Amino acid sequence: MQTREQTATVAVTPQQALWLELMQFYIREAWLLDERQFTAWLDLFTEDVLYFMPRRKNVPSRESYREVTPLGDLAVFEEDKQYLEMRVARLETGMAWAENPPSRTRHLIGNLVAGSVRFRRPLSTMFLGYVAMGIGFVLIALAAWGLPNPWKLPAMMLSGLISGLGGPFYFIPMITRMQTTFHGSEIARVFRLRLAVMAASMLIFNLGATPLFDLIGPTHTEFYFGLLLLGLGLAGHLYFRRREREPQGIAEIVRY
């Protein structure tokens, strides 16, 4: 009796295909480490690899965000390709006495989740923070002009809340982009530059606001300043919205 071979085709989503690819990578990485083939293990990584292992600290529950140290803080490992090559070369000299006899290792691979840790449109999202702040300042000025006393203060407080939403809209995408784009000491340099630019901007606006208060009054100053922020935010959002493209793959600290 003749039989006909049939080939089953299973359709998988892009995320499932990525999961399978990552799982194969981690299984091979664990095998190379268990076999102490450190040179072959090192070849898995690209030149821009960041090998990062944070510390876990005991903190109160209300400060749980501090439990895992971020990039740029003191970590167990935070090394680039050059430092990894130095570690492997040291092991191969036969004089790494701390590894004689070699350490036993055990690798458990599970609960792997394939997904994105990037904002899809980080730059345009950041400028929405300026949009929110500008709208809030304009509404504060309009509330001061147009509402009677029983409603003026609550309306101004609500407008201030809208303006305050601009902070998370700006800083969360900015910090996420810093941690997924820059490595190690680069994060500290970029953050210092950001603080310097922010301090200089505050100084310039404070110097300009003082004569404007005397010239047109504080409410008009806040109104026009809100319009300036709103215009800058909309222009930046629309500009970067056109330039941004969909991210490819996932944002991994360890690339292969």
Image (spheres, helix red, strand yellow):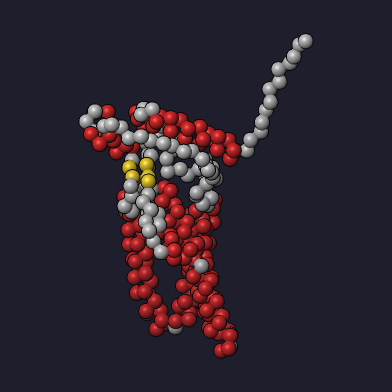
Q: Residue at x 58, y 40 (%)?
A: 15
Vertical position of residue 131 compared to residue 86: above or below? below
Q: Would you say residue 82 is visible in this rendering?
A: no
- Measuring from the top left, give residue 243's x and y in whole percent: 52, 49
**In the visual, does 101 lie left or right of 180?**
left
Q: How far across and down, in percent of the image, does residue 24 sit?
A: 51, 32
In-image side of 190 versus 24 (left or right): left
- Residue at 41% in and 47% down: 181
Which quarter of the figure has residue 200? bottom left
- Residue drawn at x 38%, y 27% is 35
The N terminus lies in which quarter of the figure? top right
Give the x, y percent position of residue 86.
Answer: 27, 35
Which of the two residues, 67 or 78, is positioned nearer the viewer here? 67
Q: Is residue 166 left or right of residue 196?
A: right
Q: Is residue 122 above or below residue 1?
A: below
Quadrant, the C terminus: top left
Considering every residue shown, the one lying at the far bottom of the view is 149
Residue 171 picture location, percent across and down? 45, 60
The quadrant in which residue 149 appears is: bottom right
- In this view, the residue farthest toward the top is 1
Asked if residue 130 lies left or right of residue 41, the reply is right
Can residue 1 be seen from the camera position used here? yes
Residue ID at (47%, 61%): 170
